[in-house]
Image (cartoon, coloured by chain):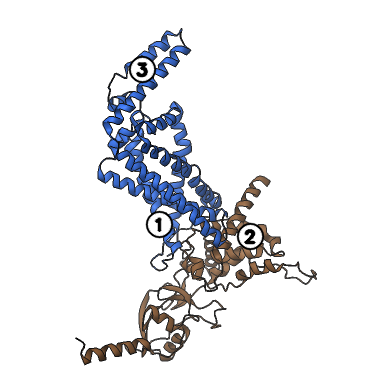
Amino acid sequence: MATTSIPEDSFLGRHQFLLYRLFSLAGFIPVGAFLIVHLLTNASVLGGAAAFQSRVDLIHSLGPLLPAVEWIFIFIPMLFHAVMGFVIIATGVPNIGSYSYQGNVRYTLQRATGMIAFAFILWHITQLHWMGAPVGGGQFDPHHAASSAAVALKPVAITLLYATGIIATVYHFANGLWSMGITWGIWTSPAAMQRANWLSLFVGIGLGAAGLGALGGMRSIDVEKAKEIETRMYKARQMLDGGISAEAQQHSAHAVSLSRESSSVMPAGSTSSANKEKRSKKKD
Amino acid sequence: MITASTLLNSETIAEHEQSPQEIRVRVLRQDAPGEESYWQQFAIPYEPNMNVISVLQRIAAISKAQDGRKVAPVAWDCACLEEICGSCAMLINGRVRMACSSLVDNLFKETPGEIELRPLTKFPVVRDLSVDRERIFHSLQRVKAWVPVDDSYDHGPGPRISPEEQEDAYPLTTCISCGCCMEACPQFNKIEVVQREEESDEELESRKQSAYDQQFLGPHAISQAVRFNSHPTGSMNADERMQSLTGQGGIQMCGNAQNCVAVCPKSIPLTRSIARAGRAATVWAIKKFFDR
């Protein structure tokens, strides 16, 4: 039963410490930091469709920079964390059957929730992010944030999958925070680890509440009403954009024609699907 | 309705539970390295205040399986019988512990009348309950768990160590290298290097050493590295120990399951050592990066 041994001169062997520490760091910054921002942004839907829409608009104000920001600060670190995570899972042999200590249960759950979170996030991105559109996903419309999310999350099965995914992801982050503090040597004594436990519990419950609150908030959105609000906000933005560009380049016929073109894209009362087709292939 | 017979029955059961007449022992045996393991049952008379070692001694004296067959005595390791030599760690009722300090009367609280014995699963079996514990000491070599003062020069008196420092280090010095922490660790995996056809003993040995070198040190070695790095004389070799701690199979392999500290028969604060080693590794790695 010899285990898979990595040759000493291999890349993984030579840089094992660095890679494991980068893995640990990536789980906190940027992936964990993103999780906090993401769940809190989503929880703003509890303040109504307009509150959520204005936050989504803020993110999407990055415009063409958004995909670059997503890949550099979210997707690539997340992929690195996931790949390293699977390497780490492969090197361990869980044994809660023999040793059902709390720490060991948490160790095993950390690995289980990591895998659940990976599968969940993959599906979540496909379902809502515009990148998932070619395979029938990409249901999130950044110009109709709350209503499109509400439609996507409405089925009970989907809601349950989301609740599971959110709980697993939040557990993985909160427990990972505690574990990371030991790895980097932030809390070293058993008493300090116990105090850190409270911190991770606090973070976990807070983020869990935000995540599940967001899920409940999205589900309880009145889709038609939300659409109305969002469309109004979208039109207002269009007018503002058009107004600014017209003002800034008053003498440029090209700019004027562009702004006309973009407002013609948005006829009154247009549906979210119409928007999606035209110029809103972006995501939260 | 309580009849006389049921009353009698429950009384005998209660009596039986208080002091069983015999101990049924299930042993996972293996005749030689690499061979198939098999279960064997033994029954020995109960005596008060037995430990697992005395149970094994009775089995050796009888050398008969429960079915009456004459069998070779069960092999096991032990020496001090007072939880200080570290040689008798085995799986007792599925959990790693020292055979000498595992009292039968306490084990009967888990499984009345029965005891299950298995060899450690993270080390190659030599025979029956005896395992090859070389890797425990190999890990100690990797982190240079000693103070190198072996020469004939007069180095003068050693540096003073404050009572606080002594108190802090003392628990770490009580490690008996029993392997319990490694056995219970989900991140510490078995390595059994088997001799290939036409492979010389030297080739086998070097292949084994390099296999041991690449895998996880184990909690005990990390704790010893911390202990010697905090010692004023030992800290003169701190860099070498940090090199091993941050090398392949070093501190990063720890998954914070914290089983080590839970099973340690000497109650050594292993997770504190691991966290301190983690902190030292953080500082050392940053320093090394900017100093090179």
Which SS class for mark 3? helix
Q: Chain of mark 1?
A: A
- Mark 2 and mark 3 on one chain: no
Q: Give, as a three-letter code, the residue at label 1.
A: Leu
The color chain A is rendered in: blue
Quadrant in the rendering for residue B217: bottom right
Estimate the x, y position of residue A30 in percent, counting from the top left.
49, 42
Q: Is label 1 on the same chain as label 2?
A: no
**Would you place residue B118 above or below residue A55 in this image?**
below
Along the viewing direction, whichever of A12 and B288 lies nearer the viewer: B288
| Circle number at residue A194 | none
Tell if the residue under mark 1 belongs to the same chain as the one under mark 3: yes
Query: Any mark on residue B241, and which?
Result: 2
Above or below, comparing residue A105 to residue B13 in the picture? above
Is residue B222 rendered to the left or right of residue A227? right
Q: Amino acid at mark 2?
A: Arg
Sequence-earlier tag: 1 or 3: 1
Residue drawn where x is 27% and y is 22% of the image: A269
Inspect the image, locate mark 3, and give the three-letter code of the amino acid beneath it.
Ser
Percent from the top left, x then y, of residue B229? 66, 62
Bin the neighbour count of mark 2 within 10 Å (Cα to Cα): few under 14, some 14-19, many 20 and up: many
Q: Colour of chain B?
A: brown
Residue located 48% across and 47% down the image: A27
What secondary structure is found at the residue carrying circle 2?
helix
Mark 2 in CB contact with mark 3 (< 8 angstroms): no
Q: Nearer the viewer, residue A160 or B34?
A: A160
User: Label 3, on which residue?
Assistant: A262
Quadrant for the N terminus of chain A, please.
bottom left
Looking at the picture, how far across and down is residue B98, in whole percent?
49, 77
Crowd class of label 3 (few under 14; some 14 to 19; many from 20; radius 10 Å): some
